[in-house]
Amino acid sequence: MISIGIIDDEQVYLDKIKDILITNFDDIRVYSYNSASKIDNDLDFILLDIDMPDIDGIIFSKQHRNYRIVFVTNYDTRIKETFGPNVYGYVSKGNLEEELVEKVKEVIEVIKCDYYVTFKVNGIDINIRVDDIIYCQYLGNHIVSIVYHDKKININNSSLKKVKEVLNEYFIEISQDIIINKHRIINFEDRYVYLDGINSKFEVSVRKRKLVRKSFYETFR
């Protein structure tokens, strides 16, 4: 669940932006604030009005590098001032319907790729960046193998379903015992899928080939 904060001193824009987000996105929480000083939730990113009466939005972004920020503005003349490592672009208030959804999609994609998950192995917590995971395989006896980079860990007392639940929707089943990161698909020929980061091919069950083919074309469109 992605948490998004909207900060604007004008209620009409708070309501409009919230309505657009709720209409176009399912797996989100939206919090509205009329001042940046009132933020009281952990947020994945903020849609921030540049010109706030209590604090300039650009100054706020430079003082709070821990927040991912998309600026919302009526004043394109200030855009050159907005660049920073935590700034993910801007949308115009005059073109909200068209620009907001696309920009929010971009930021959500970045956030999901940057998520880390924690698995316990022999009593030790192992943190893995979700997008680094290539595939997961059920080995039997309640053991799931997770392959990432050039490493592999085995999770005991688990199932493929449980592992998939802690990952995001970018992981798809190709058979009863394997799920793959669809961002890693580099080719799909006949009944085999090829993944970036591993020198192997994986057979896709008949029932899953349509899904894998669709994911492959989406990745390379």
Image (cartoon, rainbow, N blue to C red):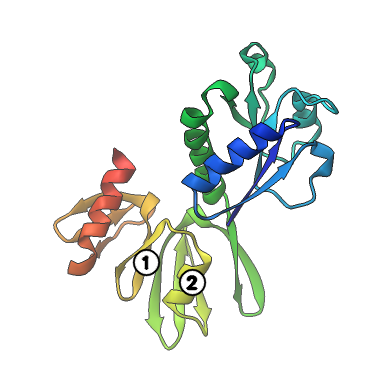
Q: In the displayed structure, does residue 79 sit left or right of residue 203?
A: right
Circle 2 SS class: helix
Residue 121, given in percent of the width and then of the height, sits at 59, 76
Going 42% across and 75% down the picture, which residue do you hit?
160
Going 79% across and 45% down the picture, which residue do you hit?
39
Residue 61, given in percent of the width and then of the height, sits at 75, 31
Circle 1 SS class: strand
| Quarter of the figure with the N terminus | bottom right
10 Å neighbourhood of mark 2: few (<14), some, or many (≥20)? Answer: some
Give me the C-alpha separation between circle 1 and circle 2: 9 Å
Residue 183, given in percent of the width and then of the height, sits at 39, 50
Give the residue type at disc 1.
Answer: Ile
Going 75% across and 36% down the picture, which residue do you hit?
65
Residue 205 seen by the camera: no
Q: Which residue is mark 2?
A: 163
Residue 150, given in percent of the width and then of the height, sits at 46, 58
Q: In the displayed structure, does residue 3 sit left or right of residue 194?
A: right
Q: Which residue is mark 1?
A: 179
Residue 58 sits in which quadrant? Answer: top right
**Residue occupying the far bottom of the picture:** 141
| Quarter of the figure with the C terminus | top left
Q: Are marks 1 and 2 in contact (CB under 8 Å)?
A: yes
10 Å neighbourhood of mark 1: few (<14), some, or many (≥20)? Answer: many
From what the image shows, is residue 4 above or below residue 84?
Answer: below
